[in-house]
Image: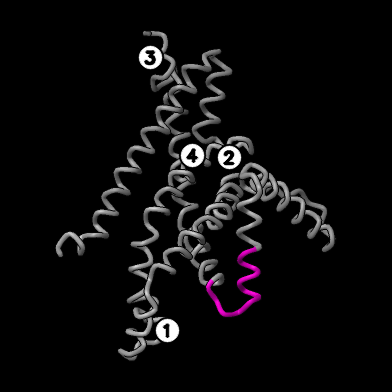
């Protein structure tokens, strides 16, 4: 027991500093991916409900593609594909240089693509839950389409989509573990290095599991509070 506590302690004797740094990377990656995924998912939902057939087709192809591909394969395509594409482009311009894509950025982009494809369905379902009379009421008040969307539709949209988006956030938090395969020093990679060096895989992967569980519990509590806050009007009535 004392040996295990020493191995996970902070300082030169243990791996606590490295594990903590990995936790920071994991949380940072999830938080950095979230706004891009939400924004892209919202735009995709607007395209899916658009009257323009080409926009609907493009959005449906996008979501089918990234919902159908394994997340790990999407990560590889972004990380290696962008590097190869940039190098070939520079060679066409006459520059023979090596380009390496930042693993954090590649992970964020790949996870945002996957997250947005699922988030678009959550937003689309929320759009369908808003009566057409809400739009007509905004237009009757003299509001433009943009103001009607921002002041009337969007608050209701977020409220309706929040449960599904909360589940997607928890999935995103766990999927950040995939970036360890492209060299990003996240929680899983740091735990793996510690396990190989100390020959204690059960200890360090068990610690990683416990940390992910704690992060999920904290996220669930925060999401419950946000959902309760969003329904404060119903409680008052």
Between 127 and 33, the residue placed more toward the observer is: 127
Pick the quarter of the image with the N terminus.
Answer: top left
The numbered mark, 2 or 3, whose residue comes first in the sequence reads: 3
| Res. 145 mark | 1
Determine the secondary structure under disc 1. helix
> Marks 1/3: CA distance?
60 Å
Q: Residue at x 56, y 24 (%)?
A: 193
- What secondary structure predominates along the stretch shown in magenta? helix
Q: Residues within 10 Å of mark 3 (few under 14, many from 20)?
A: few
Name the residue: 53% across, 53% down.
115
**Label 1 packing within 10 angstroms: few (<14), some (14-19), many (20+):** few
Residues shaded magenta: 49-60
Q: Is residue 50 magenta?
A: yes
Q: Are marks 3 and 4 in contact (CB under 8 Å)?
A: no
Q: How many marks?
A: 4
User: What residue lies at 40% left-to-right and 27% top-to-bottom?
Assistant: 210
């Amino acid at each position: 027991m004392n040996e295990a506590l020493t191995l996970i302690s902070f300082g030169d004797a243990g791996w606590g500093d490295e594990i903590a740094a990995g936790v920071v990377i994991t949380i940072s990656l999830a938080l950095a991916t979230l706004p891009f995924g939400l924004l892209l998912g919202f735009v995709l939902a607007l395209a899916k409900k658009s009257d323009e057939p080409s926009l609907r087709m493009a959005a449906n192809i996008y979501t089918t593609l990234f919902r159908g591909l394994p997340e790990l394969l999407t990560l590889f395509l972004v990380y290696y594909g962008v590097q190869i594409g940039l190098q070939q482009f520079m060679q066409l311009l006459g520059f023979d240089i090596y380009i390496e894509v930042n693993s954090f950025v590649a992970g964020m982009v790949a996870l945002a693509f996957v997250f947005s494809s699922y988030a678009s369905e959550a937003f689309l379902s929320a759009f369908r839950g808003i009566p057409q009379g809400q739009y007509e009421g905004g237009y009757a008040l003299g509001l433009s389409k943009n103001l009607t969307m921002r002041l009337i539709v969007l608050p209701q949209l977020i409220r309706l989509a929040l449960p599904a988006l909360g589940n997607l956030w928890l999935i995103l938090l766990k999927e950040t573990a995939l970036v360890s395969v492209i060299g990003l020093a996240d929680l899983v990679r740091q735990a793996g290095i510690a396990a190989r060096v100390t020959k204690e895989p059960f200890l360090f992967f068990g610690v990683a599991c416990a940390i992910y569980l704690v992060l999920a519990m904290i996220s669930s509590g925060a999401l419950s509070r946000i959902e309760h806050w969003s329904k404060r009007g119903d409680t008052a009535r």
